[in-house]
Every structure is written in C-alpha cells, then in structure tokens.
C-alpha cells in the first residue's frame, strides 16, 4: 500500500484531476492488482484524524481508530466485491 496525494497521476490514471480529487475526498482506494499495488489518499486519512470524536455519524465512532478501521474494511470489501465474478 502506498499513501498518495489526490493529484498523483497514478492514483486514478485515466481520471481527470477533478475526478481524482472527488475520489480521494471519498477515501477511495485504488488497486493495481497486476502490480500488487494499492494507493490510499492521504487527504481522507487527514480528514479522519481532524474529525472530532465521538462522531454523530451512523455508525457513531468513538475514536480515530474505529473510524479508520471501519473505512479500511469497507473499502477492502467494496473493492473485493467489485472484482468478484458470481
């Protein structure tokens, strides 16, 4: 896994700068399975760090660790589901 900025052209190579920024603000992890590489947007992690805890979100998070774990697990499951053939 590599941490990257939203303006990294390798984050989402075929996307525009605006699209890359939008994906990064949502915390989307991009994978290059052939290269065994994942790019993680640092701006989203910073946003999680800056957020006051406990949150009023659903589900509520008591700490950064809970929010980070939920985000990472959700992203991994989403990416696996998007690449699975039923």
Image (cartoon, rainbow, N blue to C red):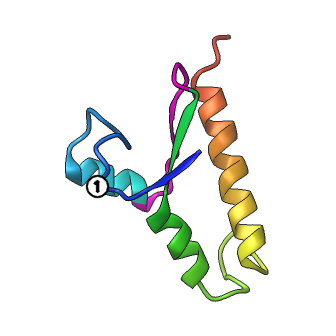
**With 3 as the anchor, is 49 left or right in this view?**
right
Please give the count of numbered marks on the rendered protein. Answer: 1
| Residue sitting nearer the eye, 68 or 7 | 7
| Residue 85, above or below 27 | above
State the image coordinates of residue 68 (x, y, percent, origin top left): 69, 64
Q: The N terminus is located in which quarter?
A: top right
| Residue sitting nearer the eye, 57 or 18 | 18
Residues shaded magenta: 25-35
| Residue sitting nearer the eye, 85 or 24 | 24
**Quarter of the image where one finds residue 4:** bottom left
Q: Residue at x 65, y 29 (%)?
A: 80
| Residue 67, above or below 54 | above
Main secondary-structure element of the magenta-colored stretch: loop
Q: Residue at x 55, y 67 (%)?
A: 45
State the image coordinates of residue 16 (x, y, percent, origin top left): 20, 44
Residue 9 part of the magenta-drawn span: no
Q: Residues within 10 Å of mark 1 (few under 14, many from 20)?
A: some
In the picture of the structure, the residue carrying the numbered disc 1 is 7
Q: SS class of the residue under badge 1?
A: loop
**With 67 as the anchor, is 82 left or right in this view?**
left
């Amino acid at each position: 896994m590599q941490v990257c900025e939203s303006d990294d052209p390798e984050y989402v190579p075929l996307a525009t700068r605006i699209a890359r920024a939008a994906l990064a603000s949502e915390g989307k992890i991009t994978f290059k399975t052939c290269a065994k590489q994942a790019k993680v947007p640092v701006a989203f992690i910073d946003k999680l760090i800056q957020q006051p805890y406990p949150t009023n979100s659903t589900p509520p998070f008591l700490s950064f660790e809970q929010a980070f774990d939920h985000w990472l697990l959700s992203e991994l499951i989403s990416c696996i589901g998007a690449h699975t053939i039923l």
